[in-house]
Image (tube, rainbow, N blue to C red):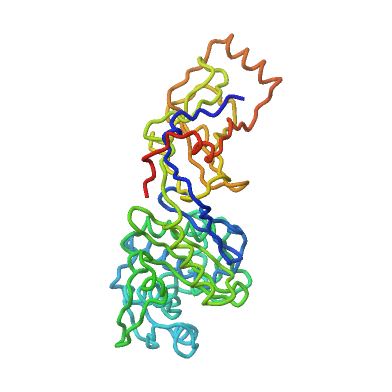
Amino acid sequence: MRGLVLPFLLLVALMTGPSAALESIAPRVALYDETTGSLLIAKDEGKAFAPANFTKLVTAAVVFEALKTGELTEATLYPISEHAWRTGGAPARVTTMFAAVKSFVPVGDLLRGLVIDYANDAAIALAEGLAGSEAAFTERMNAYAARIGLKNSRFANPTGYSDPQAKTTLADMLALAGHIRTTYPDRYALYGQPEFLWNKINQTNKTRLVKELPGVDGLMLAFDEAAGFGALLSAARGDRRVTVAASGYASLADRDKDVKALIEGAFSEYGRFELYPSGAEISQVKVFGGNVPDVAVTSTGGAPVNLTLPTGDRSRFRLAVVYDGPVPAPISRGAPIARLEVRIDDRLYQSVLLEAAADVERGEIRQRALDGFTEMFAGWWHRTIGSISIEDIVNLGALRGRHQG
């Protein structure tokens, strides 16, 4: 096996210190650094649970898309049916914006009720107005969820009311949060609005941590009898953004305390470090049937490779380049052919796509025949090129000036 090429890793600045590993009491939790793609904490993030209020994020996203495509406008009026009023309004004793039965409410106001107040009457009115019924809207929700890559989610209604068929995962919720924030940035701002006035009633943002914790600007809190208390929150400070998804807390107090500690810890106990500068050759991978035996790989577009790491102990982190190969020629420059994987113990912490740094043409017949003969005996492999501990890099010295805060 060829050793991992790490000349630029000697430039990494990783200051040593005591252990700063974060822990969570949540049965299911994922803490993700949006800036680098590092998954700081992960515990049962792929395990299914009842989505509850998280459902309303998909409800809102479907409406956001309809607004973006011009299918409706914020001024479009939707009726408050008796079903919406009885099921999601004051008679149901659930979270509501108190829209009057048989009244007509602008979509913009219904959205504010849904996003800021978690209003169930708003969710039902939007569903009925846009699709004709809750059932038809739910089909649209699930199609939307599948289209944006929510692989393990199914929704049974627009409100998140308990249903045995409804399910989601924290991994899907992290993906959804990122999708909403990047696809509908103007609409995402609604999640951070502290309050809104409707029908002479001042309704405060039910995502309380928007007001209680610096940097938090959305998204939603949740509760289900079986799944417990949950949270999906995104926070930005300086040039970093983290998103936490957690579920299964036994009490509201446990949830709020733990989530606050996770967000604070993500900013105070972790920092961003540059592993490779722009244009750095990260490694070389073996070529099959080419005019050269190996090709260098760089990050996509030659961008710097950044990683979010604890500012303390990093002894459990390792780096490796992996690929399926040898990679058959011809290879075009920029073709994705490998990955730089960062792992903590056995868990994938971050994965960076690597692309060919140069074109590789087919070799002469003799070279292709020789490669074919070699592979006939050696076989094709999922290859790992070397592996190095980040703590080993620290111990190499010459590690100054790269911590980016």
Q: Name the residue located 61 percent from the left edge and 63 percent from the top edge.
A: 48
Q: Residue furthest bottom?
A: 91
Query: Seen in the image, is 213 located left or right of residue 175?
Result: left
Query: Seen in the image, is 356 located left or right of residue 386?
Result: left
Task: Work out whether residue 7 or residue 355 is closer to the camera in this orientation and state it.
Answer: 7
Horizontal and vertical percent position of residue 58: 46, 65
Task: Work out whether residue 356 or residue 403 is closer to the camera in this orientation and state it.
Answer: 403
Q: Residue furthest top?
A: 366
Task: Work out whether residue 389 or residue 30 is closer to the camera in this orientation and state it.
Answer: 389
Quadrant of the image occupied by residue 43: bottom right
Task: Work out whether residue 172 or residue 34 is closer to the camera in this orientation and state it.
Answer: 34
Quadrant of the image occupied by residue 188: bottom left
Q: Name the residue located 60 percent from the left edge and 67 percent from the top edge.
A: 49
Question: In this picture, is 340 found above or below 286?
Answer: below
Q: Residue furthest right?
A: 377
Horizontal and vertical percent position of residue 4: 54, 29
Horizontal and vertical percent position of residue 125: 42, 77
Q: Name the residue located 59 percent from the left edge and 14 percent from the top edge.
A: 368
Question: In this picture, is 328 found above or below 13?
Answer: above
